[in-house]
Amino acid sequence: MASFRELIGGLDEAHSLPLYQQLQRGLRQAIENKALRAEDALPPERELAEEFSVSRITVRKALDGLVAEGLLTRRQGSGTFVLGRVEKNFSKLTSFTEDMLARGRAPSSVWLRKSEGTVTPEESLTMGLSPGTPVYRFSRLRFADEAPMALEYCTVPAFCLPSIEAVGSSLYVALEEAGYRPARALQRLRAVLFTSEQAQLLGAREKDAGLLVERRGFSRDGRAVEFSQSYYRGDTYDFVAELSDTETRA
């Protein structure tokens, strides 16, 4: 690989853009042009600072912005890497945590809210629950290698969990322990534009393109045990599904 100075060019102190933004722009363009590819490692901050004759604070500020954009990721003990797009198999019923671990990434979540209530008319219709059915609602921000990836809202009938406190870091683990982990699900995918609030949480811009996945999960006896709406960053996620021709051909 060429040196980073050859990839990006020099930085100009007389330019109207601050040095960290010039470095940020150069790295962004190198990623978009595929000069830097998914999983490529960046040199340590000290080396980048020496190569571009800037302070480590300038380098760190530039990298922080690209991490927030979902273009770079920091891995503890390993360094900073170009973040590749995630492929989500649309035909397998797995949790976000399981997906990230299978790809060697470190999943984490920030709970935005946990609450108790009764079904809304939409939830009643979608999940086939009687009006007044008690439910738990969960909303959280999902991360992979500390980069924001998805915003998730989930409703679960109260009979599926012993209490709302039973849910720790993983909803599916809690459901499995209670005997109500979904055995099958129906999913719908559609394109959306992020609202200002969603964009702020996901490190995107208002009206950026996103992907909304609605999932209805069912227990083995056919009861609906989960209704989730997950908003994914369109620039970091690809959804794939395996298709087969079931007809017998002569």
Image (spheres, grey):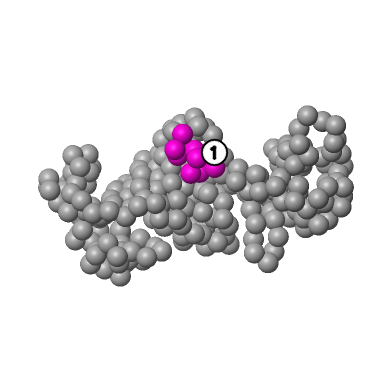
Say whether residue 72 is left or right of residue 182. right
Q: Main secondary structure of the magenta part?
A: helix
Furthest-bottom residue in view? Answer: 177
7 w.r.t. 172: above or below? above
Residue 242 spot, x, y in % from top left? 47, 48
Along the viewing direction, whichever of 10 and 38 lies nearer the viewer: 10
Residue 122: quarter of image: top left
Residue 20 on the magenta segment: no
Q: Residue at x 85, y 32 (%)?
A: 14
Query: Nearest the camera: 129 or 139?
Result: 139
Residue 21 visible to the viewer:
yes
Q: Residues within 10 Å of mark 1 (few under 14, many from 20)?
A: many
Q: Where residue 47 sits: x, y (%)?
A: 83, 56
The residue carrying mark 1 is 204
- The count of marks equals 1
The residue positioned 52% from the left and 62% from the top of the image is 101
Secondary structure type for disc 1: loop
Q: Which residue is at a point 32% across and 50% down the rendered structure image?
A: 154
**Please, is residue 74 above or below residue 63 in the view?**
below
**As drawn, is 45 to the left or to the right of 140?**
right
Residue 2 visible in the displayed image = no
Quadrant placement of the C terminus: top left
- Residue 83 image offset from top left, x and y in percent: 64, 50
Give the residues in magenta: 196-203
| Residue 243 vertical placement versus 115 (above, below) | above
Residue at (51%, 48%) from the top-left corner? 149
The amino acid pointed to by label 1 is Ala
